[in-house]
Image: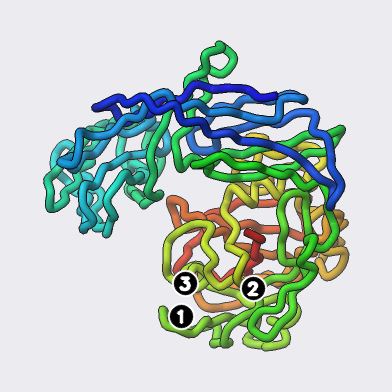
Amino acid sequence: MKKSIIVSVLFASLLIASGQTIDLTFTAIDNESYVQLDSIKVMNRTQGGDTVLYWPDTILSLYIVGIDEPWGKESAFHVFQNYPNPVVDNTTVGMYVPEKDMVSILITDVAGRVIYRSEYPLDKGFHSFKYVPSITGISIFAASHKEGNSSIRILSTISASPGIATCYYVGQRASIHLQDKDQILQNFTFSFGDTLLFIGYTDTLQSGILDAPEVSETYTFQFATNIPCPGTPTVEYEGQVYNTIQIFSQGWLKENLNVGIMIPGGQWMSNDSIIEKYCYENEPDSCMKYGGLYQWNEMMQYITQQGRRGICPPGWHLPTDEEWKVLEGAVDSQYGIGDPVWDNYNPRGYDAGTNLKATSGWNNNGNGTNLFGFSGLPGGSRNSAGFFWNIGFCGFWWTSTECIYGAWYRTLYCGYPGVSRNDGDKYDFGLFVRCLRD
């Protein structure tokens, strides 16, 4: 059985009926054995809103009843009005590029003072940007392309980042809006490129999957945990062998990444063809025990795209901020996957940190239970001054997601049962990297 949602496209100039259907189908296994789902919750992590399917409904059908495109082949370069507007913390700006070329973006206040300026090489098609205002009131988002200029006015009610405006490229996509013919789903909105969180429930267990669907897909929740990833118990990469660990629908390397050439802590990593790493106190044995420490850009290999492979092995990628939230909800005994607590800063949750920490090596009686095999160790970090600190007390792990003041990372402490979500300077800090299976 399936639940159906009527879909209409947002970019409105010409409406063309298409009748296309996108079916999202859900099933579940425990290792390799079939599991019957009780329900599936679907959350839009980009725009908000959710809906729930109850067994035997296991298919969510999105019926596209209209496509909204610019007129014909001579479509003009255009910036679409942002959503949401007014802005509280951040907003999404859509753009249509008629021909591959450079696009210049200039954001100013109403007096003409420059807030943000940058250029992007963009392919033909629809593109999205995320903008975090630095002022309250009105800002002007203007973009120029060889085919023309376009601008919008953005109203911000609260300055999320006083004095520091952030604008970054999200990706290329089409955009659609979901409207349910039943009242229960009228608030569920989705655009191609939005990240959806699917949470499968069976008995007392839950398992989460993140994706940005653009075609019909089948999603299989995994309810096995604390076992090697089925079919991939180990990964050999750059002369080292890593164990794997399955934690519900996520497969992780069981050890921190240790790849690259060691450089002194006082030296900055460089954008070249050589992967560089720090070892705590410049001791190679520390890298063998805890893994290498990396600056964010080195980890990303100097391409800003969350969820990319970066320095991870083939078939694995750098976890996003949202993927870390799924892990935290999966291992916490009180706050589940998708709970708003995971959007907060500082130690969050009840015992996720305790359950992720190794059973030895932590100071001040801070050892964990390691219930799910993540085996987090307190390897410390390299700070912005080039010194090493906090070994035995803390473990720090990068995400591949940027934020206002740099990039998100996670911290496990010897004295706290929760997990801290922090934003750090991606140009200075040296933190650990844990890779996630594609």
Outermost residue to the top? 183
State the residue position of label 3.
Answer: 301
Instruction: Sort mark 1 into few (<14), some (14-19) or many (20+) by Cα contacts within 10 Å.
Output: some
Residue at mark 3 to residue at mark 2: CA–CA distance:
25 Å
In this view, 175 is above or below 396: above
- Which label number is shown at residue 103? none
Q: Residue 53 in the image: x percent, y percent?
A: 69, 25
Q: In this view, does 391 lie above or below 114?
A: below
Q: What residue type is labelled 2?
A: Trp
Q: Quadrant of residue 45?
A: top right
Which residue lies under the disc numbered 2?
A: 389
Residue 89, given in percent of the width and then of the height, sits at 42, 37
Q: What residue type is labelled 1?
A: Trp
Label 1 SS: loop
- Residue sitting at x 48%, y 20%: 179
Tell me the distance, in whole angstroms, between the alpha carbons under discs 3 and 1: 14 Å
Q: Can you identify the residue that label 1 sits on?
A: 268
Q: In which quarter of the image is the C terminus?
A: bottom right
Which tag, 3 or 2, sits closer to the chain's start? 3
In the foreground, 257 or 343: 257
Q: What residue type is labelled 3?
A: Gln
Mark found first going from the N terminus, 3 or 1: 1
Numbered disc 2: secondary structure: strand
Left or right of 39? Residue 127 is left
